[in-house]
Image (tube, helix red, strand yellow):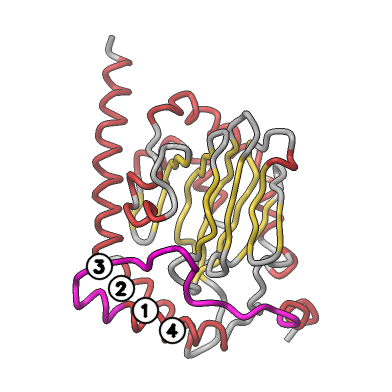
Amino acid sequence: MSVTQTQTTQNQPAQQFGTAGIKPMGRPSLTTRLFMRVVAWVERLNLRYSTVGNPPIYDKAVFPWAKEIEKEWPAIRSELDSVLTRQEDLPGFHEISSDVATISQDRGWKSFLLCGYGFRSEANIARCPETWRVCQKIPGLLTVMFSIFEPGKHLPPHRGPYNGVLRLHLGLIVPEPRDQLGIRVENEIYRWREGEAVIFDDAYEHEAWNYTPHTRVVLFVDFLKPTRFPARFFNWLLLNLAVFTPFIREGMDNQKAWEKKFYAEAEALRNR
């Protein structure tokens, strides 16, 4: 184990398997309930066999590729600017992933998805080819999207659904005053900077806010958490099986329906 990895394993808080005040995901299916029991077992393996420790927020030195992502942020920002020409037409995140409705029920948190857990938006990738190219540098890539916080948006404390993935935020539009926006992961607060990446474990309780009068946007990426065998195998298996669960399939259907409408409207505007 390297010095950096050793440092990341010291004085780490215990990960909790739930968040006070947030209802657990409710699904009537027996298959889904059994699946969630397996998830809880694999989560414990992921904590035990992590090769990068289990801190709430990581030292980026643990992931050398993060510097490459930061270097290319202007190209990603340029494509984001094009996407934001239709900002009002972008979906609220809860409109794509209905389970997000437990923490967000308005359109103050918008998204523009390139890929997510087995689904690829070919139309959105074609619109943001540089963003897609840059993200291929991330090992174990699972999800890529632009995450857009409108002024005044606050996500309450919550826990991500699974600790077998880690999350990267790359600051793309970070308005002033910076002390009026940020993300808390466990007991650590990070304030985004344009061109700067932060990597954290969303399985810890976290909340995010933008109390500035302007829009905040980050590149939002989920990737496989590095683990040793046997956790590595079961993590891979679980994430591949997740594609067939109701909440992932429902999200895919919602995304496809939104894209059909979004690009049909774009075509109609071009043909006027």
**First in residue order: circle 3 vs circle 1:** 3
Which numbered disc, 2 or 4, marks the residue that appears first in the sequence? 4
Secondary structure beneath dot 2 equals helix
128 in relation to 39, above or below = above
- Local SS, label 3: loop
Residue type at mark 2 is Leu
Instruction: For marks 3 and 2, give the CA distance.
Output: 17 Å
Tell me which label, 3 or 4, sits earlier in the chain.
3
Tell me how far mark 1 sits from mark 2, CA to CA: 6 Å
Q: CA distance from mark 3 to mark 1?
A: 21 Å
Q: Nearer the viewer, mark 3 or mark 1?
A: 3
> Which residue is tagged 4?
42
Query: SS at mark 1?
Result: helix
Q: CA distance from mark 3 to mark 4?
A: 20 Å
Report which residue position mark 2 lands on: 241
Question: What residue is at 42 percent from the left and 42 percent from the top?
Answer: 125
The magenta stretch spans which residues? 9-35
**Disc 2 versus disc 4: distance between alpha carbons?**
13 Å
Q: Residue at x 74, y 35 (%)?
A: 177
Left or right of 115, for residue 80: right
Farthest residue to the top: give it: 272
User: Which residue is disc 3 drawn over?
Assistant: 27
Mark 1 touches mark 2? (CB < 8 Å): yes
Q: Position of residue 155 (x, y in %)?
A: 52, 50
Q: Which mark is residue 237?
A: 1
